[in-house]
Image: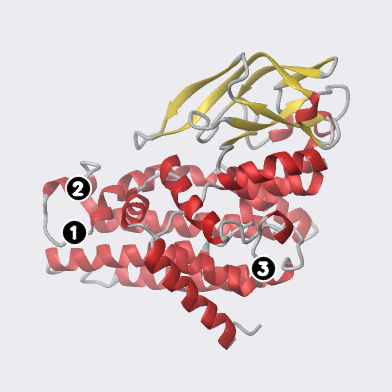
Amino acid sequence: MDLSFTPRELEFQQEVRQFLAGNLPPHIVEATASNSSVFVEKDIALAWQAILVEKGWAVPQWPTEHGGTDWTPAQKYLFSKECYLAGAPMLIPLGLLMLAPVIMAFGSDEQKRELLPKILSGEHYWCQGYSEPGAGSDLASLKLKAESDGDDYIVNGSKMWTTHAHLADHIFCLVRTDSSGRPQQGISFLLVSMDTPGVSVAPILTMAGDHEVNQVFFDNVRVPKSNRIGEENKGWQYAKYLLEFERGGGFSAPRIQHELQRLGKLVAATRQEIADFDADGEIARRIARLHIDLKALEITELRILSSVSGGGNPGPESSILKLNTTRLEQSINELSVDVLGYRGFPMNPIADGIPNRPDYISSVVPRYLNNRAASIFGGSQEVQRNIIAKMVLGL
């Protein structure tokens, strides 16, 4: 596989760099660097999204008829890489990169006309209602019930670990519309406005003290059947399609490269503070191993991107990416905490005022704590291995 870029692609890379240099506000870079959660704050993400929408670069993954860029796979990769290296935040993917592909593939023409422009503009801010108490990795056992009542469904139950539900104005949900057959056969994909009577949100605080996830309750919530995506009881098919984009629809290698660069700055600052730091070279060896693994991930992403450039979905390879991305990110988190050592105990070591300390250091420990959940959310590591065993290895 030829990993070199053409002169035209390198020219595009320079165009992206110039755009970022002139249009990426410093306060957005600062907020992104200090963020310890999965997503940056809503106002930061939407501010950057608005800038990209104005430029026409917000959704390179979308078809051009819906606002996409018609970029080549290499251009998409270079754009993603340069954004991360410049310190830009990841746009919130819940609507843009998870729900939108489902609407494009399975939604009605009316749903496409109504919803896609609002997702793109940020007018609609979505959250995902998949997991429930007792139905996380075993998602097919979900029990959120949607009973038919004329042109509506009456929805009762709850969703758990719902990221940004306290900020969202809409939620896309998997609901139980039939319990007579196999669990996967009675699920439907439903869109619900968060201001509908009977919908309520309870916060769940993480170990790092962040409020990012929630439990969402549905108490006799009346939802029009016109809010259903696709056919009734076919939601499992749509859910699996969505999860392929959640687990492997983007580029993780450039983001991890940026995180490795930040780790390098932390190591350099620590060397200045501690004369005999890493005297045995163990930290250097671990960093070298991370760089090797990152290169393997980058090549895998480029190969998969090439295969889906015609508009297909990522397929089971998304599980391979999910496994390796999580492992790499957690390894960087762990090594960062090891480098920080006892200085990380206060959870905010920048407050001690030691010179030459990178500003983002205050997020090192919270980022480590929050990212322990990456082994579970989006599909646990065990589930990903089962998918690979079945769909890739044929076991």
Whether 353 is drawn above or below 264: the answer is above
Say what amino acid the circle numbered 1 marks.
Arg
- The Cα–Cα distance between marks 2 and 1, rounded to whole angstroms, is 9 Å
Residue pictured at 62% horizontal, 41% vertical:
118
Instruction: Give the percent coordinates (x, y) of residue 322.
Output: 59, 55
Give neighbour class at mark 3: few <14, some 14-19, many 20+ (Cα, 10 Å): many
- Quarter of the view holding residue 60: bottom right
The residue depicted at 83 percent of the width and 28 percent of the height is 186
Q: Secondary structure at mark 1?
A: loop
Total number of numbered labels?
3
Residue 14 relative to residue 361: left or right: right
Residue named by callout 1: 357
Q: Give the vertical position of 292 relative to 132 (above or below).
A: below
- The first of marks 2 and 1 along the sequence is 2
At which x and y percent is residue 282?
31, 69
Residue on which disc 2 sits: 349
Real-space Cα distance between discs 2 and 3?
Answer: 40 Å
In this orientation, which residue lies closer to the viewer: 190 or 372? 190
Q: Is residue 357 visible?
A: yes
- Residue 305: horizontal and vertical position, in percent? 66, 68
Residue placed under numbered mark 3 in the picture: 305
Instruction: Say if residue 315 shows up in the picture.
Output: no
Q: Residue furthest front?
A: 54
Tell me, yes or no, whether the two marked residues, 2 and 1, touch with CB atoms within 8 Å.
yes
Q: Secondary structure at mark 3?
A: helix
Amino acid carrying label 3: it is Leu
**In the image: residue 349, left or right of residue 237:** left
